[in-house]
Image: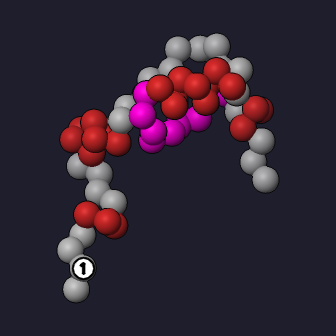
Amino acid sequence: MLNLQRMNMFVAVVDSGSFTAAATALGQTKAVVSFTFASWRASWGLRCCCDRPVG
């Protein structure tokens, strides 16, 4: 099992409030950059499988 407390950096695709809470809980003291899924998708063209038409 991965121990996130030993990581220097992590990436999460969550809303900014949850990202900040997770970073704080893990003891991250460096500045972090967070994006909502919508902004990642707009910037990088990310798509999840639920966006694909079924059939």
Q: Which colour scheme is used?
A: secondary structure
Q: Position of residue 16 (x, y in %)?
A: 43, 28
Q: Is residue 18 left or right of residue 27?
A: left
Residue 18 visible within the image: yes
Give the residue drawn at x 69%, y 25%: 25
Q: Is residue 12 above or below residue 48?
A: above
Residue 34, picture quadrant? top left
Give the residue drawn at x 59%, y 35%: 10
Report helix, strand or loop for mark 1: loop
Q: Position of residue 1 (x, y in %)?
A: 79, 53
Observer-nearest of 54 and 33: 54
Give the residue drawn at x 21%, y 41%: 42
Q: Is residue 7 above or below residue 37?
A: above
Q: Position of residue 23 (x, y in %)?
A: 61, 25
Q: Is residue 40 above or below residue 27?
A: below
What segment carries the magenta color?
A: 8-16
Give the residue drawn at x 75%, y 48%: 2
* Disc 1: which residue: 54
Residue 44 visible within the image: no
Q: Is residue 4 left or right of residue 49?
A: right
Asked whether residue 30 is drawn in magenta, I would say: no
Mark 1 residue type: Val
Residue 29, picture quadrant? top right
Q: How crowded is mark 1: few (under 14 residues within 10 Å), some or many (20 or more)?
A: few
